[in-house]
């Protein structure tokens, strides 16, 4: 398990950004230590955060990221819809590149 500071080092996020992600519900099933109620992260959480960072780099809005997370939490039945979201975002980015 990792503390907020350790998770920041592993992901490259600032403390404030990670705290914001937590407060916005972007990290599901967030764990807390029983002694101090501090946020704690495991390897799955770190990988989840890195995936969020990829979506952010692909210019997904916060609303789109939340939708994507909702779909992920629903399971494999939403893979097609998630793929569609990614394909559409790729097209948007390719259009921006062409325009530039």
Image (tube, rainbow, N blue to C red):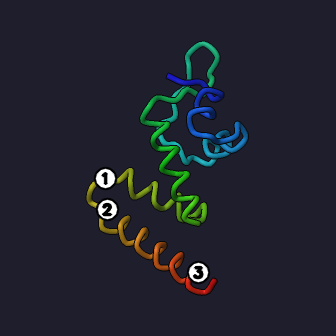
Crowding at mark 3 (Cα within 10 Å: few <14, some 14-19, many 20+): few
At 53% from the left edge and 83% from the top edge, which residue is drawn?
95
**x, y (%) of residue 29?**
47, 37
Residue position marked by numbered label 2 in the rendering: 78
Give coordinates of residue 80: x percent, y percent.
30, 67
> Seen from this angle, which residue lies furthest bottom?
99
Q: Does 28 appear above or below 88?
A: above
Which of the numbered marks, if any, corresponds to residue 75? 1
Comes first in the chain, label 3 or label 1: 1
Dot in front, 3 or 1: 3
SS at mark 3 in the image: helix
**Mark 2 or 3: the one toward you:** 3
CB contact under 8 Å: marks 3 and 1: no
Q: Are marks 2 and 1 in contact (CB under 8 Å)?
A: yes
* Residue 84 position in % (x across, y down): 37, 72
* Label 2 neighbour load within 10 Å: few <14, some 14-19, many 20+: some
> What whole-number distance in Å separates the C-alpha atoms at marks 2 and 3?
28 Å
Q: Which residue ends up furthest to the right in the rendered image?
A: 16
Q: Quadrant of residue 32?
A: top right
Name the foreground residue: 15 vs 95: 95
């Amino acid at each position: 398990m990792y503390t907020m500071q350790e998770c920041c080092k592993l992901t490259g996020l600032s403390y404030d950004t990670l705290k914001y992600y937590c407060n916005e519900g972007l990290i599901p099933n967030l764990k807390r230590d029983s002694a101090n109620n501090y946020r704690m992260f495991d390897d799955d959480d770190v990988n989840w955060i890195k995936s969020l960072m990829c979506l952010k780099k692909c210019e997904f809005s916060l609303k789109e990221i939340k939708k994507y997370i909702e779909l992920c939490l629903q399971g494999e039945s939403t893979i097609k819809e998630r793929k569609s979201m990614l394909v559409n975002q790729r097209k948007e980015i390719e259009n921006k590149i062409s325009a530039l």
